[in-house]
Amino acid sequence: MIDVEHRPPRVRRVTTTRARWLAAAGVAVLLVIAGGWIPGIVGTAVAAALPWLGLVLLALLIAALFLARRVVVVILVPALLWVLAMAPALPALPGPTGSESASASGLTVVSQNVRARSGGAAASATELAQSGADVIALVELDGDSLSAAQNALAGQYPHSYTVGTVGVWSRYPLANAEPLTLGLSWKRALRVEVQVPSAPVAVYVMHAASVRPGHQQDRDTMLSGLADQVGSDPADSLIAVGDFNAPSTDPSLTALRAEADWVRPTDGSLGLTWPVAFPLVRIDQVFVRGLDVVTSGTMRAGNSDHLATLTRVR
């Protein structure tokens, strides 16, 4: 093996140039990942790209091993930071199913953004019902899709509550239903108590405001409001689902993570939900408190541009 110092000058120059480019790329990725802790549009953008930056780092690491081994350490630094940043969003193993009695007392909750004016709410509702869910939460409902969902679910889910563009249907009776504005002037969220035989479970359903460059204050206000609401909720058990319009590691979810547990997918994936043709980011979230997660994953339903989340708890 010829040492670098004894290679011809031209070969040394090429190797040095490659090393510099790889090192620069590694530093650039490091800075991008670090931006994921900055609140606002920067943190949101980095959180959306974070899962895919792992592939970039893997490519850089392979390139360094073959082209410039002396910069491998430089690439390992952003790789370690990536692991730390992604840790809160990594998948988990399925929880124990327990005894038959424990299993029977479980609650399965599915949630989907059905995409307003898509004409697919009835199909989504029907397919979500076929999953065996006890509670179905739908968001981004317009007048027509709300009627279609109600007609599709009325037989199996006799208990329902809707407000604005969000709704919940349940096999079990509902109590203490209330609309939530979460700091805005219009209602895009709700809270109900599902009267499960074992114990009531508070269920939150929300559709956070959209995020656009320079326009995400409404979303952040809603997420902060939900965190306050959950934090002051006296319920022993609760679950919050819906379209949060925030990637899993978004800094805007920090306050909510302090009040409830983010539900990790148990199917070995990252649970990415949007867009349905090729999911790139998870913006449909599930949080629980006082409940054990048995399984959590995603499923396709209707012709929405979002995958549905499916979570079984007990």
Image (spheres, rainbow, N blue to C red):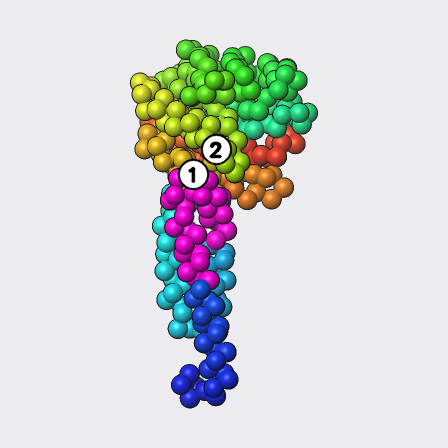
In the displayed structure, does residue 278 sit left or right of residue 197? right
| Residue 114 percent coordinates (x, y) | 60, 27
Quadrant in which residue 118 is drawn:
top right
Q: CA distance from mark 2 to mark 1?
A: 8 Å
Q: Residue placed at 33% from the left, 20% from the top?
A: 233
Residue where numbered disc 2 is placed = 216
Q: Is residue 218 above or below residue 212?
A: above
Q: Residue furthest front?
A: 214
| Residue 299 percent coordinates (x, y) | 56, 35
Q: Nearer the viewer, residue 306 or 164?
A: 164
Q: Residue placed at 44% from the left, 58% from the top?
A: 28
Answer few, some or many: residues within 10 Å of disc 1's Cα (few below 14, many 20 plus, some between 14 and 19).
Answer: some
Q: Amino acid at mark 1?
A: Gly
| Callout 2 touching callout 1 (CB < 8 Å) | yes
Q: Amino acid at mark 2?
A: Gln
Quadrant in which residue 220 is drawn:
top left
First of labels 2, 1 by sequence position = 1
Q: Is residue 198 above or below residue 52?
A: above
Q: Residue placed at 46% from the left, 40% from the top?
A: 41
**Which quadrant would the N terminus be assigned to in this image?**
bottom left
Whether residue 204 is visible: yes
Q: Residue furthest right?
A: 119
Whether residue 83 is visible: no
- Helix, strand or loop at label 2? It is loop
Q: Nearer the viewer, residue 94 or 57?
A: 57
Residue where numbered disc 1 is placed = 40
Q: Is residue 172 magenta?
A: no
Q: Is residue 44 magenta?
A: yes
In the displayed structure, does residue 256 sit left or right of residue 207? left
Quadrant in which residue 255 is drawn:
top left
Q: Is residue 108 above or below residue 263?
A: above
Residue span colored magenta: 25-53
